[in-house]
Image (tube, helix red, strand yellow):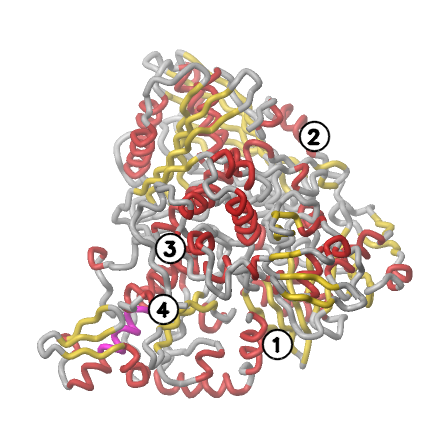
């Protein structure tokens, strides 16, 4: 099915589309709207799709087609990586359109910068960046349907209302279905998107309800949705082998021998462009099936020139970090008040050293991309979180004009930040340039773990001061992280100057030291926050314990009066929203209730990606350090919830992802090589160990924000604080398996 | 020439298929049945789960020559004449999937569980489902969906109805 759709969309590309575009543009004008994120949006354009090409009728803008049979097709622009964005985006449009959801079809939009700007899923930014644009896409389409009905009835548009894909004239009891109006509506002038009326929140019918994912039928019947499922006529299968230590080059390889293996069509060396995020040197094997390609890979004998390759060693780096922790830090990130004086006056000081390891992403769908160079065009099918950038990268890499690169986005079998980097697209494109056929590059799991863009390890040397009343009076955090260029921390190693609690304390100092690293690091679900929150929220609990105070009360006191630290800036902590979710999580979890011996509760809060999230974990630990997590309670404020089902799912998944990671995940690097290469060495949480996750939302009046990430960072600290409450054992190093715990 | 019995049909394999090829890759690359997924290749993740004579097995670990005369069912053959099973419908109604990549394997394991134990306990579910990894960690809803088809009321299932978009 995928293949058929793609073939049609390919067939309509080229001349016919260009002609259609200019005709459409001429009629409706090109509306540029400075939406959130500065996206230039063409509401006057039709979608770039076979459906739109099939008929001129009913195309209201680049997001919405109404068909005469009263079905509504909505185009989902951003990559669906499991965060539910395809459903959520369509809901926002359908709400303002007043579409009958049971007649809505949702299609994946083409990757098309002209229509949709930068299509990417990352940073939990899809909702906040597109909320306004999508509402206006729905509202302008609705206004065109109303205008068409009003014209037909010869009544003022203001007398018409809409409901469930119908325009109603209440005064005369007349009604048109959207399908009846489709053709006429598409000929209406496009209203001014910046002034089109939007619904009030109390009038929402769809938003905030529980909506099942729009692709769920295809998922449960095993339809080919994902990048790895792409199949083209005459397609060949590729694997690509790079140096296990990043930066190594191919000196020689047994290519002649490989080419004689059954099913192997070709084998060749790519020099690459030396960019880790694009194409590094390696050997491509082209075969008649994935299995043949994998087998040939196993028979490859490559001599690597490792003179310029990584010699990174994570064990040595860990030891060096402990040495550096004794120093004050090379660079001051933030310095508020008079920290030294505050420590001098302290009734009590507390020190602690926290550390967390390198991680990989292990999206369950390994990296893959299908590429086909034909008729001067590089055509690509890829599960990328960042397909628009992929298009640009491939054009530059192959020295092709951008209009000679076509990228189709597929459903993505897990992102977690990994697929924001497009090395697998670039490799497939480079390979396809040398193969006179469509070629599907599939990485083995071992490739996927060996050549990830890792979550960077981190080390924190903390010091806190308490006064005689047990109040926190000063804070010091020396972060030891890594650098690739000797200037800036690697991705995820950048501690923000305003990171809590620096932003609420009178005296606080954060500093940073860096160690060199060649292994690439990248976005990993809630970059930075996923490590910082564990360390910071754990140390805050240590301070509460040292002060002899209840953690909840201590934590709330730190927030002070309810206030938005930078009013109007959604990226700034709101202490009132923070306190509200902390109280809600505590209340729902039964904070303070009597717990049996060996059991305990732990609390943590973190603000990131515009979301305020508090979590409470309830655990018990037996004498063999077997951990049972009984329940995780999540309380989140991300403004109004778009899809209650999807929002809950993101919180449940993030909490369990965090638990999985803190329990057993650690990447070790030796001689520049990643030591863990499959799930046997990198144990993911399984059903039998997965606790219930209760999710509660405070649906505040702030603009809605994303949920892919913010529910992950508090988990590790909440669980570690609960283990302390249960046993008195303070966990200052992740993963827990390294301290003898099992789950 | 190898023959397979897949989803009630006899399928001929081309001569160039190596008899040692894992069933997973025969299904995917030679029979265009893409529902079973590659996740690890070492039988650790369960994304490749199919039924062999009604039992859930890891198709990445089984050479195709070993199953030539046996009854293979993949996710594509789970629905009866296009009619979804109650389990598949529960997966939709409870919105189990996030990325969805592992879910065909999860469904095949759950279907095999229910075939043997129509009213599984939580412990039965833990045992039957712990060979299937979900990187998105949809475990709460997988459990709820399995219980929901056995008539057990769950917290999830008791909430307001889920809206379904048009097909």
Pointer 1 or 2: first along the chain: 2
In the rendered structure, find residue A104 and report the number of the disc placed on it: 4
Pointer 1 or 4: first along the chain: 4
User: Which chain does the numbered disc 2 sit on?
Assistant: A
- Which quadrant of the figure has residue A199? bottom left
Q: CA distance from mark 1 to mark 4?
A: 33 Å
Q: Which residue is mark 2?
A: A315
Q: Which of the image's four quarters has the C terminus of chain A?
A: top right
In the rendered structure, find residue A404 and report the number of the disc placed on it: 1
Q: CA distance from mark 3 to mark 2?
A: 40 Å
Is A511 left or right of A667, judged from the image as shown?
left
Q: Which residue is mark 3?
A: A128
How many numbered tags mark residues here? Answer: 4
Q: Residue at x 39, y 11 (%)?
A: A347
The answer to the question of whether label 1 and label 2 lie on touching residues, with beta carbons closer than 8 A, is no
Q: CA distance from mark 1 to mark 2?
A: 46 Å
């Amino acid at each position: 099915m995928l293949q058929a759709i793609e073939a049609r969309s390919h067939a309509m590309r080229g001349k016919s589309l260009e002609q259609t575009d200019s005709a459409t543009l001429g009629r409706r004008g090109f509306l540029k709207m400075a939406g959130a994120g500065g996206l230039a949006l063409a509401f006057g354009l039709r979608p770039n799709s076979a459906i739109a090409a099939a008929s001129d009728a009913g195309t209201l803008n680049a997001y919405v087609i109404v068909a005469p049979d009263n079905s509504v097709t909505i185009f989902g622009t951003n990559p669906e990586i499991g965060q539910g964005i395809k459903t959520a985006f369509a809901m926002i449009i359908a709400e303002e359109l007043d579409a009958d959801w049971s007649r809505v079809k949702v299609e994946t939009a083409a990757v098309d910068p002209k229509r949709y700007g930068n299509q990417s899923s990352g940073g939990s930014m899809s909702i906040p960046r597109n909320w306004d644009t999508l509402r206006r896409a729905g509202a302008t389409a609705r206004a065109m349907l109303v205008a068409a009905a009003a014209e037909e009835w010869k009544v003022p548009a203001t007398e018409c209302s809409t409901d469930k894909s119908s325009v109603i004239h209440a005064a005369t009891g007349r009604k048109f279905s959207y399908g009846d109006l489709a053709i006429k509506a598409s000929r209406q002038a496009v209203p001014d998107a910046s002034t089109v009326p939007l619904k009030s929140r109390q009038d929402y019918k769809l938003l905030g309800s529980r909506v099942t994912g729009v692709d769920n039928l295809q998922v449960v019947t095993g339809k080919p949705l994902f990048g790895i499922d792409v199949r083209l006529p005459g397609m060949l299968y590729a694997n690509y082998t790079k140096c296990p230590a990043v930066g190594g080059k191919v000196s020689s390889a047994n290519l002649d021998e490989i080419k004689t293996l059954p099913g192997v069509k070709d084998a060749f060396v790519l020099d690459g462009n030396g960019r880790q995020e694009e194409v590094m040197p390696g050997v491509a094997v082209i075969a008649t099936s994935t299995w043949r390609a994998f087998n040939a890979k196993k028979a490859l004998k490559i001599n690597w020139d490792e003179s310029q390759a990584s010699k990174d060693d994570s064990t040595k780096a860990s030891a060096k970090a402990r040495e550096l922790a004794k120093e004050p830090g090379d660079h001051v990130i933030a310095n508020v008040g008079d920290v030294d004086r505050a420590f001098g006056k302290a009734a009590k000081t507390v020190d602690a050293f926290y550390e967390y390891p390198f991680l990989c992403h292990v999206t369950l769908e390994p990296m893959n991309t299908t590429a086909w160079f034909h008729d001067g065009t590089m055509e690509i099918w890829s599960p990328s979180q960042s397909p628009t950038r992929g298009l640009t990268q491939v054009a530059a890499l192959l020295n092709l004009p951008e209009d000679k690169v076509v990228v189709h986005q597929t459903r993505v079998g897990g992102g977690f930040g990994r697929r924001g980097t497009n090395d697998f697209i670039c490799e497939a494109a480079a390979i396809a340039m040398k193969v006179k056929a469509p070629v599907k590059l599939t990485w083995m799991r071992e490739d996927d773990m060996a050549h990830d863009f890792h979550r960077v390890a981190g080390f924190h040397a903390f010091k806190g001061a308490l006064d005689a009343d047990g109040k926190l009076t000063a804070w010091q955090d020396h972060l030891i992280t890594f650098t690739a260029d000797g200037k800036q921390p690697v991705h995820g190693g950048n501690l923000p100057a305003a990171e809590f609690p620096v932003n609420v304390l009178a005296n606080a100092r954060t500093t940073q030291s860096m160690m060199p690293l060649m292994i690439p690091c990248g976005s990993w679900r809630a970059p930075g926050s996923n490590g910082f929150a564990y360390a910071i929220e754990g140390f805050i609990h240590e301070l509460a314990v040292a002060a002899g105070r209840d953690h909840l009360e201590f934590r709330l006191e730190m927030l002070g009066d309810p206030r938005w630290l930078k009013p109007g800036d959604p990226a700034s902590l709101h202490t009132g929203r923070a306190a509200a979710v902390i109280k809600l999580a505590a209340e729902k979890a039964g904070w303070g209730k009597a717990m049996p011996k060996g059991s305990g509760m732990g609390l943590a809060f973190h603000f990131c990606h515009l979301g305020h999230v508090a979590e409470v974990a309830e655990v018990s630990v037996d004498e063999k350090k077997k951990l049972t997590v009984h329940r995780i309670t999540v309380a989140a404020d991300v403004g109004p919830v778009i899809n209650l089902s999807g929002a809950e799912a993101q919180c449940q998944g993030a909490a369990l992802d965090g638990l999985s990671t803190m329990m057993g995940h650690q990447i070790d690097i030796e001689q520049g090589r990643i030591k863990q290469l499959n799930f046997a060495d990198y144990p993911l949480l399984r059903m039998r160990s997965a606790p219930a996750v209760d999710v509660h939302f405070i649906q505040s009046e702030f603009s809605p924000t994303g949920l892919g990430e913010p529910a992950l960072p508090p988990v590790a600290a909440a669980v570690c604080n609960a283990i302390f409450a249960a046993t008195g054992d303070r966990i200052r190093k992740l993963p827990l398996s390294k301290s003898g715990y099992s789950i | 020439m190898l023959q397979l019995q897949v989803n009630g049909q006899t399928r001929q394999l081309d001569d160039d298929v190596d008899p040692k090829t894992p069933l997973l890759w025969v299904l995917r690359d030679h029979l265009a049945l893409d529902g079973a997924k590659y996740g690890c290749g070492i039988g650790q993740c369960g994304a490749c789960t199919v039924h062999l004579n009604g039992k859930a097995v890891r198709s990445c670990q089984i050479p195709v020559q070993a199953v030539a005369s046996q009854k293979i069912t993949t996710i594509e053959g789970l629905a009866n004449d296009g009619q979804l099973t109650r389990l598949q419908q529960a997966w939709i109604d409870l919105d189990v999937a996030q990325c969805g990549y592992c879910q065909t394997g999860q469904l095949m394991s759950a279907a095999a569980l229910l075939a043997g134990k129509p009213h599984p306990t939580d412990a039965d579910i833990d045992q039957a489902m712990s060979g299937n990894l979900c990187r998105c960690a949809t475990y709460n809803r997988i459990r709820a969906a399995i219980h929901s088809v056995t008539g057990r009321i769950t917290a999830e299932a008791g909430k307001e109805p889920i809206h379904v978009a048009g097909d």
